[in-house]
Amino acid sequence: MTAETLVELKDLQVHFPILRGVLVDRVVGHVKAVDGVSLSIPRGSTYGLVGESGCGKTTLGRALLRLVEPTGGTAVFDGVDLTALGSNAMRTMRRRLQMIFQDPLSSLDPRQNIESILTEGLATHGIGADRAARRALVGETLDAVGLPRWALSRYPHEFSGGQRQRIGIARALVLSPDLIVADEPVSALDVSIQAQVLNLLATLQADRGLTYLVIAHDLAVVRHICDTVGVMYLGALVEQAPSAELYTRPLHPYTRALLSAVPVPDPDVEDRRERILLTGDLPSPANPPSGCRFRTRCPWARERCAQERPELRTLAAGHTVACHFAEELE
Amino acid sequence: MALLEVEDLGVTFRGDREVRAVDGVSFTVDAGEVTGLVGESGCGKSVTSLALIGLLPKQNTRRVRVDGRALFDGLDLLRADTRTLRDIRGREIAMIFQDPLSSLNPVVPIGVQVAEVLVRHRGVSKAEAQRRAAQLLDRVGIPDPNRRLKEYPHQLSGGMRQRALIAMAVACRPRLLIADEPTTALDVTIQAQILELLKELVREDGTAMIMITHDLGVVAGLCDRVNVLYAGRVVESAARRPLFAEPVHPYTIGLLNSIPRLDAGQGARLTPIRGSVRDVLPWSQGCAFAPRCDRAVEECLAGPPEITGDPHSFRCVNPGVGVDLEEVR
Ligand SMILES: Nc1ncnc2c1ncn2[C@@H]1O[C@H](COP(=O)(O)OP(=O)(O)OP(=O)(O)O)[C@@H](O)[C@H]1O
Ligand SMILES: Nc1ncnc2c1ncn2[C@@H]1O[C@H](COP(=O)(O)OP(=O)(O)OP(=O)(O)O)[C@@H](O)[C@H]1O
Ligand SMILES: [Mg+2]
Ligand SMILES: [Mg+2]
């Protein structure tokens, strides 16, 4: 089965200018938040993007929806290059690409009741013949995310964190999008609630054939819900593989360090495991290291790593890695 | 006798509405041992630790009532006068918070802040304190400590700041270290470094530690004894291995079943706990967890359940038999 591709990013770039100046700002450099990312997401699947704080995950997701403007590369969605669309065409297109956010409370207007939050997008996009039709659609969506109908007349602060995240999901879902970009959808939630939301996302995908781009720093969460996982470091992908494969056979030193650092709720595993402790911190994306960006923290770095930036190479079916020495380290 | 013995600690906030944030919590901490307090947001972890060292906002006013006992080497911290407490804090008991920025002074260089602790509590000279501060930064893994000493908190990364805070906390070789979510704001690779550092401190200095976290993975790797809190009470308490191998309280079991694990079979559906922490019953009427509990029976609503069992204790009238973790894998 060859699945149809819904999203295809080619060499996507987002460079933010760094401005300095007393009277007139001048550009003194660029933060290379996303620096040449290529990936594709088959329709109906879930792609997970992981990496440490500041590596560019959110910026990538926002660039795909053109909530920030890409400074290079292309983002093709269902055959249409979004980066070439005019703003009107993009606004129309946006119904099909929705985003849900980490902190549901700050992304919901506290003065709007739930009904108004959910019908706002419908009105913007002219969905639903009349008020009754919209109400019906909103009601169905509430059912789908497991919220009671009486929620409609309430306000965001009257709900718990997990319920608020359901409201955020409902707001995206009511527009019948093809793609949902979920930026840290559960990281602000209590542990016991995270599973409710993760299960809901899975059910909705099964029922509606949704495609997800899930951005998360929690590798266990990503592994649980994603078909393919991409690991980002300083604005670029360093490894990409089918989820099961990435976790059983990580090839990039960074992926290996990342996996070895995740605490597992099992004393036996914790006592036995070997940690690859990285030294130092993430370098600044305004001034990334030469050659391989990970080399300054890589326990296996050699001379070549400082000179030559490793390209993503395919080492197994669907498994690509950007490391000169991946084979040797295995 | 353990270094710290907390008995029936209770904290009530009085406002328009009384909030019993901590409701009869007991646990002990021994030297060279890590005791974990684990539970979800709002269950009373931070309030417990702040009450112990007298740092609750308005702790000594009528707005806050603290009851119970907390014997630190025989001295009841809850009844100690302000001066005694101030003396103990920083020298014998030190605390590390989740957000290092808010616990560091933004306009004072890191080195001065670390040195100050030594001058205040150990009475060493300023020059000597500076020298020791550099050693401390080095010990917590801050590269180029002599340069870093002159820097301000905002010039350090999150991981570095947390290290600086740990350096301050251990400057006087405290006997008890209280760490409240010390790694929650950090990336996993940095978290791994910090946890390693804390383990080393406990091992090498024989420091006693209270580790507050919501992450059962962190607990599994670090804590000798674990107390699971729900709505201000300890609902299960056991040594680390039995707690994970044979959890008996439905809440603990529920937590373990609801977290995705890195080493679990993929795609398996998670079993969430239904409802949310908002669906609580006051303990006075029965088990606070009953409204969310799959094993709830009528007796759960018959009054507050007692905690039973030693050394593996739990507060439940219809305990589970524990998850078979082999099967989950
Ligand atoms: N509008 C902006 N202007 C300038 N720099 C920005 C802007 N937005 C993001 N950045 C920078 O781009 C880099 C990537 O940020 P981004 O928010 O995408 O990271 P992230 O991977 O989502 O991190 P986190 O896990 O913390 O959410 C960071 O260095 C950030 O400071
Ligand atoms: N000053 C205060 N006045 C009134 N209620 C308070 C006060 N401080 C805390 N509380 C309440 O006490 C309860 C316990 O709070 P605490 O901060 O100890 O939770 P926690 O377990 O540390 O949660 P988290 O994981 O979110 O840090 C909460 O319900 C909180 O709302
Ligand atoms: Mg982000
Ligand atoms: Mg807290």
Image (cartoon, coloured by chain):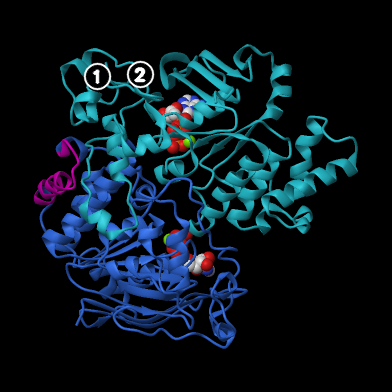
Q: Is residue A177 visible?
A: yes
Checking the image for residue B256, the label placed there is none
Mark 1 Cα-neighbour bin, 10 Å: few <14, some 14–19, many ≥20: many
The residue positioned 70% from the left and 49% from the top of the image is: A144
Q: How would you classify the magenta stretch by its main secondary structure?
A: helix
The residue positioned 22% from the left and 44% from the top of the image is: A275
Query: Percent from the top left, x then y, of residue B126?
Result: 13, 51
Distance between the alpha carbons at the discs numbered 2 and 1: 9 Å
> Viewer-proximal residue, A248 or B242?
A248
Query: Percent from the top left, x then y, of residue B227?
Result: 36, 71
Q: Colour of chain A?
A: cyan
A43 in relation to B256, above or below = above
Checking the image for residue A324, the label placed there is 1
Q: Which residues are magenta?
A: B128-145
B142 in relation to B279, above or below = above
Q: Say which element carries label 2.
A: loop
Mark 2 Cα-neighbour bin, 10 Å: few <14, some 14–19, many ≥20: some
Q: Amino acid at mark 1?
A: His
Q: Is residue B123 visible?
A: no
Q: Quadrant of residue A36?
A: top left
Query: Percent from the top left, x then y, of residue B165?
Result: 27, 51
Q: Amino acid at mark 2?
A: Leu
- Per the image, the residue denoted by label 2 is A312
Q: Colour of chain B?
A: blue
